[in-house]
Image: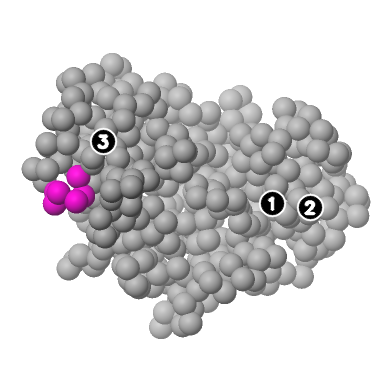
Amino acid sequence: MIDSLRATLRAGTLAEELLKPGREVVLRSGDRKLDRDELRSNAEQVAGGLHGLGLRVGDRVALYAANSLDWVTAYLGIQRAGAVAVMMNPDYHAAEAEHILQDSEPAIVIADRTRAAIVEKLGVRPIGLEELPRSAKPPLPPLTPESPAAILYTSGTTGRPKGAVLDQGNFLAQGRGALDVWRWTSKDVLVHALPLFHLHGLGMGLHGTLLSGGSATLVPFTPAAVVSELTRDDSDRGTMFFGVPSMYQRLCDWLEANPSDLSHVRLFVCGSAPLPPALFARCEHLLGQPPVERYGITEGGIVVTNPYDGPRQAGRVGYAFPGVEVRLGDLDEVLLKGGQVFQGYWRNPQATVEAFTPDGFFRTGDVGEIAEDGTLAIRGRLKELIITGGFNVYPREVELVLEVHPAVQEVAVAGMPSDKWGEEVTAFVVPSTAAPLVESELIEFAHEHLAAYKCPKRVVIVEALPRNAMGKVQRSLLVK
C-alpha cells in the first residue's frame, strides 16, 4: 500500500508537471506578472538557448542569483532542458561560491549582475540572468522520476556543505504531499518571501504553487510587505504564508505596532528552525491562528507536519507526510524513509553509505521524541549533544525552559570546553526588554525546571545569534 502511494507521488517529471498550459496568472513580482502559458514559453525558450550553447541532458547548471521572476524562468529552463540545477545561496561570498563550483563542476553558471563579478573573479565566465539565451524549444528530454533534478547543498552548520542530489520524483513527492496535508488548491495565493534556492522556498513554495494550480507573489521579506500582500483588497490577496521563526518574530513585532486583520488568511506555515512556544502563542494572538509547524531536511524536503485541521501543538512538528515513514534509532535519532528522500550525496559515496541504515532509512542526525499520539518533537542535533560530567544534555531541552523567562528574547545553548566537566552547558542569550537579565537569576530559574546537570553554568549575553540563510542557529560560531 505505502509503496503504491510512493510511486503515485513520484510519477512524472518536473518539466511536464510544473509547466502546464493556462492563461491564469501564476507568478507576480512587483509590477510584473506571468501567466502559465508565458512561463511555459519562457522556460522552453531558455531550454533551447542552453541547448544551443552545447548543454546536454544531465549536465549541471549552477544558478547564483537573488529571488526574481528571471530566477524562476532560468530554473524552469534548466529543468526543461533536462539538466541538473545546482542551487547557490545568493548570500555566498567568494570562498563559499568557489567550494560549490569546484565541487559540482557545472557546465554553465547563471548569475545575476551582483554575483557575476564574484564568479568572474573565480575564473568562470557566467551567463547573465538578465540576458538568458533563448531559442526554439528542444524536444522533451528522456527523463524518469529517478533522473537527477538538482543538487542542494546542506546548510553547513557543522562543517563544509555536501551536495544532496534530489531526483525528479523526490521533488514531485514533496510538492504533492504538501498539497494533500495543507489543503492547497488552485484558489490559493502564496505570499512567497523565502529564498528560492532553498528546499522550503523551492520544493514547497515554487513547486507547490505550480502543482496546485494556484499562484504566488514573490516579495523580499519585510513585515510591511508581507502584511500588505495578505491584506490587499483584490483577487491577488494572499491566502498562505510560509516562513521561519525569525520571520514570525519580526512579523509579530510589526503587528503589535500596526494591528491588522489577518483572519482571512487560510494558512501560516513555519519551519527550518524550532518555533519557541512563546512565539507560537504570540502568533496565535496576533495572526489569529498559530502557524503549522513542520519539519524537513535538505536531503528529503518537508517530511513531517502538524495537521491542518487538528490541534497545532507548540514544540511538536506533527505527523509524517503521505508516503513517509518515521522512526527513532540509536540515541533517539530521527530516521526517515520515503519517496521524498534523496538517494545520495554528489560524488561522496562514503557519506552516502554512512547516511543510511542497512534497511534503507536515512539518518537525519536530529534527536527526536515520539509521543503517545504519534507526533514528533525535535530535541536537538546529535552533533550538538553536550556531554557534561558524563551526562548527555540536548540543547533544545534547555532552550525550551529558558525561552519562557521574561528576560530572554532568544537563546542558544552550547557546550564550552571545561577541564572540570568535559563540556560546560552555556547559554548564549539575547536579552529582551521586558525584564533585566541577571545571570544568577536565570541559572536559578533553570534549576527550578531541570536536573542540575542540564542547567547552564554560564550565561553569555550577545546582541544576536548567528544564523544561516534559513534561520538555523550556527552553534559552532558561538563556541569559537
The answer to which of marks 3 and 1 sits earlier in the sequence is 1
Residue 384, disc? none
Q: Is residue 253 visible?
A: yes
Q: Which residue is mark 1?
A: 86
Residue 106, disc? 2
Split into 4 quadrants, where in the image is the N terminus?
Answer: bottom left
Residue 14 against residue 98 in the figure, above or below: below
Nearest the camera: 231 or 458? 458
Q: Are marks 2 and 1 in contact (CB under 8 Å)?
A: yes
Residue 476 against residue 230 in the figure, above or below: below
The answer to which of marks 2 and 1 sits earlier in the sequence is 1
Residue at x-position 17% and y-position 36%: 443
Q: Secondary structure at mark 1?
A: strand
Nearest the camera: 293 or 96? 96
Whether residue 25 sits left or right of residue 414 in the image: it is right
Tell me the kind of residue under disc 3: Arg
Q: Nearer the viewer, mark 3 or mark 1?
A: 3
Q: Quadrant of residue 290?
A: top left
Q: Quadrant of residue 147?
A: bottom right
Magenta part of the chain = 450-455
Whole-percent x and y of residue 185?
Answer: 43, 52
Nearest the camera: 411 or 391? 391
Residue at x-position 50% and y-position 62%: 300
The answer to which of marks 2 and 3 sits earlier in the sequence is 2
Q: Which residue is mark 3?
A: 458
Residue at x-position 66% and y-position 34%: 93
